Amino acid sequence: MATSKLLTICLSLIAVVTAQAQEVKPGTIPTAVQWTINAAGRAQQTVIHSVFMLYCPKSGMKGTGFLLSNGLIVTNYHVVEGCTKDEMLADPWSKSAQFGFTKMVVDTIRDLALLRPAKKLQGGLELAATDNQPRT
């Protein structure tokens, strides 16, 4: 009986500590996300830090954007549809603050959009060159 009570108390304390650790404060990321980033290798961390949450407060649309090594962020057109470059925001999965964009170019047929961040970002994904690109 005493062991059962002790186990219940321990589990309750773990639940409280876990809940407190999962609270997300402005300007921070969830603890579980930070643990995942810390556990990843160097190559995986580069990929993780190249992913951004994009959103437009005007339309309520949200989506994922990927930082390329040339400094641009690529996403789908349907994520930015109905918004201007000035209305789009990016929120990185790191401790840096959200930012906007200075330019946006879209291709509605291919459902692609390129955005130029208002601040210089380090890193990014390298696109491989290929001769097998489709011709239009």
Image (spheres, grey):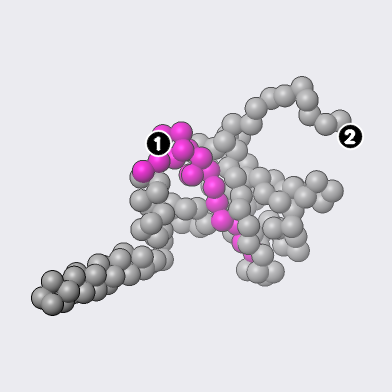
Q: Is residue 65 above or below residue 23?
A: above
Q: Residue at x 78, y 25 (%)?
A: 132
Circle number at residue 41 = 1
Within the image, what quadrant is residue 83 found in? bottom right
| Coordinates of residue 110 in the picture (x, y in percent) | 80, 46
Circle number at residue 136 = 2
Where the N terminus falls, by quadrant? bottom left
Q: Which mark's residue is nearer the viewer, 1 or 2?
A: 1
Secondary element at tag 2: loop
Q: Is residue 71 left or right of residue 38?
A: right
Query: Range of the magenta residues?
Result: 39-56
Q: Is residue 86 left or right of residue 12?
A: right
| Coordinates of residue 64 in the picture (x, y in percent) | 61, 53
Front in this rendered view, residue 122 or 5: 5
Residue at the limit of the structure toward the right, as seen here: 136
Whether residue 95 is visible: no
Within the image, what quadrant is residue 42 found in? top left
Q: Residue at x 35, y 45 (%)?
A: 38
Q: Residue at x 63, y 62 (%)?
A: 62
129 within the magenta span:
no
Secondary element at tag 1: loop
